[in-house]
Amino acid sequence: MTAAALTVTACGRNADAGGSTGGQTGAAISTGKASGTITVWAMGAEGDNLPKLTKDFETANPGVKVQVTAIPWDAAHDKFTAAIAAGKTPDVAMVGTTWMGEFASSNAIDPTPASIDKSSFFEGAQKTTEVGGTSYGIPWYVETRVVYYRSDLAKKAGFETVPNNWQGLKDMAKAMQTKAGAKWGIGLQAGGEGSWQTVMPFAWSEGADLTKDGGKAYNFDSPQLLKATKYYQSFFTDGISDKSAPATPTTEPDFASGKVPMFISGPWEMSAVEKVGGAGFKDKYNVAPIPAGSAGSSSFVGGSNFVVFKNTKNRDTAWKFVQWLADPKVQAKWYSISTDLPSVKSAWQDPSLASDKKLAVFGKQLETAKAPPSFPTWEQAVKGLDTEMEKITKTGEDPAQGLKTAQQQADSIGTGM
């Protein structure tokens, strides 16, 4: 999974453009079984695996046909925007969460019917479906970021687990170098695309908000983000993290060898590090929540949503399919197929998830994880923040100046609302 594929969002727009300050609810859907054919677009591995799941929907609704088209992530956004412009969208689609504001502003996606229980989802994930107080679709699967650490090496460094505060994390990372033989104490992204996803958990843990003026403008130069950025920079200036880390990460082999015994990432890394580490490696590492700031422990919530396009010729079945995807049992089965984590809180009670102590850490972190705003220009604006983070980490740029520059760029771009 790429950083671009995993980014997320949430926030406002007026009614004519696909949202409203008061919020809209989609028209009701009928009771009874679904019927007819629906077309579905889905990206990456999810697109490849989804037909394994849709067979169950077809079995439960005799006569229904779900036609899934798998699309590469790097081609998806352009394919969607072209389809919206041409009025040739699929009935239903998996959508990157950072695209929600843009698609809602195009008046392309249908508000969520009241029959779908929004409270069943993790709050941060549900927020990624909302534009201007209106929900569009459902959060389909989720991910969040936590601290991975070599528990065997942590003991050598004098730590049983990751301390739940910023200074403690830094002390542990330094001890990994001085006492456990690590070259770098913790692997942190030295700027570049998606680096905001590693910085923002610390900022959110300080109570940062990426919007201001009642959610109508970007807020990249807040005191909370500045404090988090100074802390993040200190890992590089103090020689604890590698400011020359390669553009193509070597996370798994470096973690397995002990060269870099700590890093921050999502749930997909569990299978990746265990594959590289070999037999028994799962007992040599653990995961822990993001160390708390003054506002507690928070993190980034990612994943993907499922939406229904207004152009659909079979709206009733399209929404029944989306509602079916949010069933806890279906969510648990999807996890068994894909290892994508459920967005529905009750699905985590399934034995396949509940028995895994590492997954429980992700589940707990998801309770407080947050998403960026669903401004149509988010991906464009955040590039400026990523660029400044690279200067801050690699060349020692003053964090206050870097954030001021990112703010000025964001202001010139505007929210697109």
Image: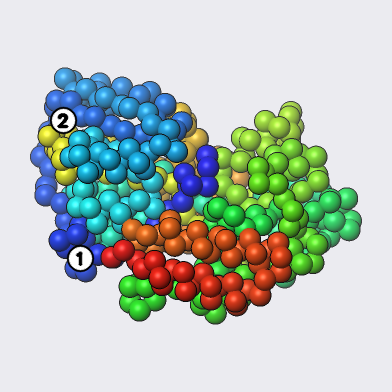
> What residue is rendered at 74% in x and 38% in y?
253
> What residue is rendered at 53% in x and 42% in y?
2
In the image, residue 397 sits, relative to residue 160, either above or below, namely below
Closest to the observer: 406 or 328?
A: 406
- Element at label 2: loop
x and y percent of residue 294 in the render? 58, 76
Q: Mark 1, residues whose alpha carbon is within 10 Å: few (<14), some, or many (≥20)?
A: some
What residue sits right under mark 2 in the picture? 34
Type of the residue with mark 2: Ala
x and y percent of residue 47 in the render? 39, 30
Residue 207 appearing in the image: no
In front: label 1 or label 2: 1
In the image, residue 390 sits, relative to residue 53, either above or below, namely below
Is 391 left, or right, of 261 in this rendering?
A: left
How many numbered tags mark residues here? 2
Type of the residue with mark 1: Asn
What residue sits right under mark 1 in the picture? 14
Residue 333: quarter of image:
top left
> What residue is rendered at 26% in x and 24% in y?
67
Residue 354 appearing in the image: yes
Residue 198: quarter of image:
bottom right
Is 167 left, or right, of 306 in this rendering?
A: right
- Element at label 1: loop
> What residue is rendered at 38% in x and 46% in y?
96
Q: Earlier in the sequence, mark 1 or mark 2?
A: 1
